[in-house]
């Protein structure tokens, strides 16, 4: 497993828990607004300092009494065939595990859930169906996304859906997403970060909803979810 980064302590990445976040290398999406280019683009990944698995697990052993959980994110963690074993080793140390995923690998997610290796799943919903290819930078992913949406809604595992309000994503798009995923437990809207290098800078020319508009949308859609807010 290639580890490209480690945030040693976070109070926000795992709701209600003190956690560490581990960033795995590689992604099958090319979201134009993505700022984690060092974890996604092969040319950038070559120069990204790596953390060995041994060092990572030694860190966890030292922090067993201080941390509640581990957030596994990327990149996209589910592209790695050895992810179940990696997560299993984390669980053996007594940590809760939250997985951040783009939802593109339902088979892997089903395997992880079936083996009871996950405690919380955060799934990105990039766009309404008709804009998915553009805002994910990948083709033909909607059927897989829909499969996982339906899976999470019927499983007992804790989960959230979340959407980054990227340039080009309009109010009507968010309302279409709400119709697609509801009823659901949690849905969060996230402001996009455009102050760093992103995969496709041309997206900055598209209309961008200000935070005030996003907050108004949240007030409108809140009744559809147990929890809904702007992050």
Image (cartoon, rainbow, N blue to C red):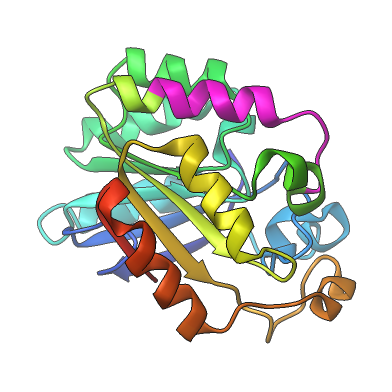
Q: Residue 62: say if magenta.
A: no
109 sits to left or right of 105: left
Which of the 4 image quadrants contains residue 92?
A: top left
Which of the 4 image quadrants contains residue 199?
A: bottom right
Q: Nearer the viewer, residue 7 or 33?
A: 33
Residue 185 in percent (x, y) is at 27, 42
Instruction: Check the picture and name the quadrant holding the C terminus.
Output: bottom left
Which of the 4 image quadrants contains residue 95?
A: top left
Q: Nearer the viewer, residue 18 or 218?
A: 218
Residue 143 in percent (x, y) is at 66, 22
Looking at the rendering, the stretch of residues picked out in magenta corresponds to 137-151
72 sits to left or right of 197: left
Q: Is residue 113 visible?
A: yes
Residue 150 in percent (x, y) is at 44, 22
Q: Considering the whole magenta stretch, tell me its main secondary structure.
A: helix
Q: Nearer the viewer, residue 149 or 110?
A: 149
Q: Residue 143: say if magenta.
A: yes
- At 65% from the left edge and 65% from the top edge, which residue is drawn? 170
- At 41% from the left edge and 51% from the top edge, which residue is drawn? 56
Instruction: Check the picture and name the quadrant holding the N terminus.
Output: top right
- At 67% from the left edge and 63% from the top edge, which residue is drawn? 169
Residue 27 in percent (x, y) is at 70, 44
């Amino acid at each position: 497993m290639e580890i490209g980064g480690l945030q040693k302590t976070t109070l926000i990445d795992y709701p209600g828990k003190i956690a560490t976040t581990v960033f795995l290398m590689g992604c099958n999406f090319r979201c134009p607004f993505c700022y984690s280019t060092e974890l996604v683009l092969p040319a950038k990944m070559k120069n990204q300092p790596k953390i060995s698995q041994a060092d990572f697990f030694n860190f966890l052993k030292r922090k067993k009494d201080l941390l509640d959980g581990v957030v596994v994110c990327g990149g996209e963690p589910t592209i790695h065939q050895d992810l179940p074993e990696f997560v299993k080793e984390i669980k053996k140390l007594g940590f809760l595990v939250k997985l951040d995923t783009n939802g593109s690998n339902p088979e892997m997610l089903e395997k992880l859930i079936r083996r009871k290796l996950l405690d919380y799943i955060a799934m990105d919903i990039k766009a309404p169906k008709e804009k998915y290819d553009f805002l994910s930078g990948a083709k033909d992913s909607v059927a897989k996304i829909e499969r996982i949406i339906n899976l999470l809604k019927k499983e007992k595992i804790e989960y959230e859906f979340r959407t980054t309000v990227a340039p080009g994503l309009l109010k009507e798009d968010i309302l279409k997403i709400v119709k697609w995923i509801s009823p659901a437990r949690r849905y969060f809207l996230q402001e996009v970060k455009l102050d760093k290098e992103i995969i496709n800078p041309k997206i900055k020319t598209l209309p961008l909803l200000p935070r005030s508009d996003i907050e108004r949308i949240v007030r409108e859609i809140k009744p559809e979810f147990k929890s809904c807010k702007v992050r």
